[in-house]
Image: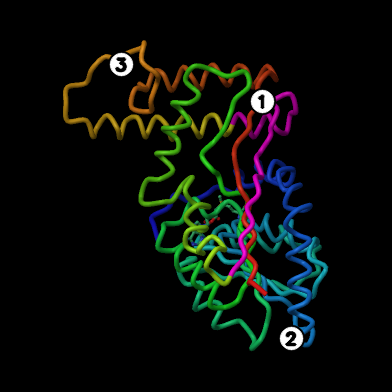
Amino acid sequence: MTQLDPISSDWLALREHADDRARTVTTTDLLPPLVRSLDAEATSAGGVPVLCIDLGTGTGANPRWLMPRLPLAQTWLLVDHDEALLTELRERLSGLNVPWEPVASDVAHLGAVLAMHRQPGQPVLVTCAALLDLLDSATVEDLAAILRDAGAHGLFSLTVDGTGTLDPAGPLDDAVQAAFNDHQQRHGHLGPDGVPALQRALGDGVTSTVHVTVRQTDWQVDAADPADRALIERLLRDRAAAVAEQVRRDGTDLTEEPQEPDRTAPTTSAALTPQDVEAWRDDRLVAARDGALRLRVGHRDVLVMPSA
Ligand SMILES: C[S@@+](CC[C@H](N)C(=O)[O-])C[C@H]1O[C@@H](n2cnc3c(N)ncnc32)[C@H](O)[C@@H]1O
């Protein structure tokens, strides 16, 4: 469990279409084996509905995407530690004819949630989107142990992997990305190590009782598209604010006298100044407003299946 900044529901709404587009690979590569395996397990358990648990559900984007794509009897628990976000679920999930209930809980209590709600022999799918980077390594190790012990399936979508490109590229892009990745790992969060940490905890499918498949599910966004432009502008502002905070933190940590950055050396996160970050943000925002900026933001999906 780690300290977390609240996530705003307008950010979740802005990102949803980029998430949906990125999940084309999820649909083609990961859903078919998942559905086949859950279907077989549900049939041998006498047709009982699959218990689907969405961790860090926010405003329910992941169940909204996944419910209609699972041609199975299903019942959902939508888990989040932010009760304010859970209050939006009723409106956001209206029209979906699938039983669900909100659960105000930290992911760290998944074992108790499962024990309270699972019927004997019931197949389980544990899922999430855009969450693993926000967890710490102990929580991910517990999550992996629960998956193994419960013989559960897992679909962990859209975890940032710390890579990204801007087109056209700028001289500070790599330093900004590096500083942003450092910022994501504050308070012990895994940040870009979210997927590798889960793979390590699961034993990577080599010695363990689970089979793990990973696919790249990158955002590809283009400021020429007005919906993407709104997302890009927000991302640039939020990223610059996070990087500025990281630069301040790195500066505070310095024990030596501050020095002029060496402009001839390759730029690292520690070499950025607050003025660099502002200049980067303003330059990229102008390009975005002109519809002349494309971004790739690296994400990964992980499918976990109990070995037959
Ligand atoms: C980036 S948002 C993603 C929300 C949603 N899955 C989506 O794709 O739109 C992460 C969500 O996880 C929740 N969250 C983060 N850490 C959590 C934890 N340890 N336990 C429960 N919820 C958590 C946050 O409150 C937030 O709603």
Marks 3 & 2, CB-CB < 8 Å contact: no
Q: Which residue appears at 81% of the width and 69% of the height?
A: 97
Which span of residues is magenta-colored?
A: 210-233
Residue 80 placement, left or right of 249? right
Q: CA distance from mark 1 to mark 3?
A: 29 Å
Cβ of mark 1 under 8 A from ligand 1: no
The disc at residue 45 is 2
Marks 1 & 3, CB-CB < 8 Å contact: no
Q: How would you rate the neighbour count of disc 1 (Cα within 10 Å): few for under 14, some for 14-19, many for 20 or more?
A: many
**Residue in front for this viewpoint, 201 or 173:** 201
Residue 175: % across, % down: 44, 26
Does dot 1 land on a helix, a strand or a loop?
strand
Residue 71: % across, % down: 83, 68
Looking at the picture, which amino acid does disc 1 mark? Arg
Looking at the picture, which amino acid does disc 3 mark? Pro
Residue 221: % across, % down: 69, 32
Query: Is residue 142 located in the magenta-colored stretch of the structure?
Result: no
Q: How would you rate the neighbour count of disc 3 (Cα within 10 Å): few for under 14, some for 14-19, many for 20 or more?
A: few
Looking at the picture, which amino acid does disc 2 mark? Ala
Does dot 2 land on a helix, a strand or a loop?
loop
Q: Residue furthest front?
A: 206
Residue assigned mark 1? 294
Residue assigned mark 3? 261
**Residue in front for this viewpoint, 216 or 251:** 216
**Image quarter in which the C terminus is found:** bottom right
Q: In this picture, is 55 found above or below 219? A: below
Does dot 3 land on a helix, a strand or a loop?
loop
Q: Which residue appears at 76% of the width and 47% of the height?
A: 24
